[in-house]
Amino acid sequence: MTNFASDNVTGISPAILEAISAANLDHAASSYGADKWTAGLSEQASEIFEKDVTVFPVISGTAANVLPISSLTPAYGAIYCHEYAHIHTDECGASEFYTGGAKLLSLSGKHAKFSAEKLSAAIFGKGVARHAQPALVSVTQTTEAGTLYQVDEVAAISAVARDNGMKVHMDGARFANAVAGLGCSPAEITWRAGVDVLSFGATKNGAMGAELVVFFNKTDSRELEHRRVRGGHYLSKMRFVSAQLSAYLTKDLWLENARRANAMAKRLASHLEEIPSVSFVHPVEANILFLSMPGKMVCHLKDAGFEFYEMSETDPVLVRLVLSFNSSESDVDRFGEIAKSLS
């Protein structure tokens, strides 16, 4: 089976696996993050983002989102996000739970992106006691549709947030794919564009299980240490998470893996663009493809050993394909050739 359903199904990047093994060779000097791997993460991340940042390793994307969101949002606050955002659709109300009751307000927009104008029009209730107070905006980068916010789009959203006294969170579960796809620096698409905190994903891009919360303003990070303990992410053997992240950030492995995944997505797209019966639902800008495909083609590809998500029960079928750092050219080409033979 070749699994194009998700980048969560892949193995571990060899350099990261080696780092975990190296961290296991002997006793650590101390526990709960007082180790050399965790201590070095702030310096590594600060170099990458060209700014002195505060970082917190955690082990899940949900934690990487909701812990900083809850640190910056009061229980009576309003959080604005796209209607397809992971925090809104796939995290079981975790943001509401960890904030103690803050309200998620969803925004619409093509290709899973909302605009600064859409955000501005949706903000209401500021200063009125009976309404949830605008507190935070969450932008997903790469989006749930596999599309990318451009630097000026993030900056415009951040400007609206600032004008309304709100913080800006970026859900970067596929942040590496976004940076690789945009060809910009990590600083340009985050703090220079007005982002206050980033959930820097690693698990989808070669880690075993590791995410990094990155605060660009030290004063914003004060609550996170306590919330991380309460949320069960203050790990006694944190060195094994930090060792993954350290290897991920070393020699731009995070970007190298993302560029590979993006290139495989582009390669697959180039095959499928030749097929008249296949249409693209969203532009291919990172490592995800959304396609409308004849049901017969879907069945043949499944029979040939390919796994991917069928997002509808209609014919043609809406399918999602996700490429990864270790997707092979031969598998991509075989998928394309089978699909073309059925057109």
Image: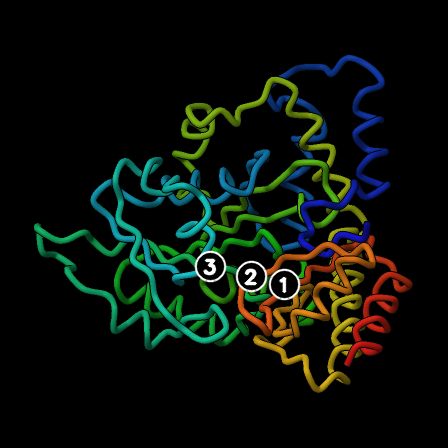
Residue ID at (39%, 39%) = 94
Q: Mark 2 or mark 1, which has the lower sequence index?
A: 2
Which mark is first along the chain, 2 or 3?
A: 3
Cα–Cα span, label 1 and label 3:
29 Å
Residue 56 position in % (x across, y down): 55, 36
Q: Which secondary structure lies at badge 2? A: loop
Q: Gap in Å between the C-alphas at discs 3 and 2?
A: 32 Å
- Residue 174 or residue 200, whichever sits in front: 174
Q: Nearer the viewer, residue 158 or 10?
A: 10
Q: Amino acid at mark 1?
A: Arg
| Quarter of the figure with residue 19 | top right
**Circles 2 and 1 in contact, beta carbons < 8 Å:** yes
Q: Inspect the image, locate mark 3, and give the three-letter code of the amino acid beneath it.
A: Val
In the rendering, which numbered label is found on residue 195?
Answer: 3
Q: Which residue is mark 2?
A: 311
From the viewer's perspective, tell me whether residue 66 is left or right of residue 8: left
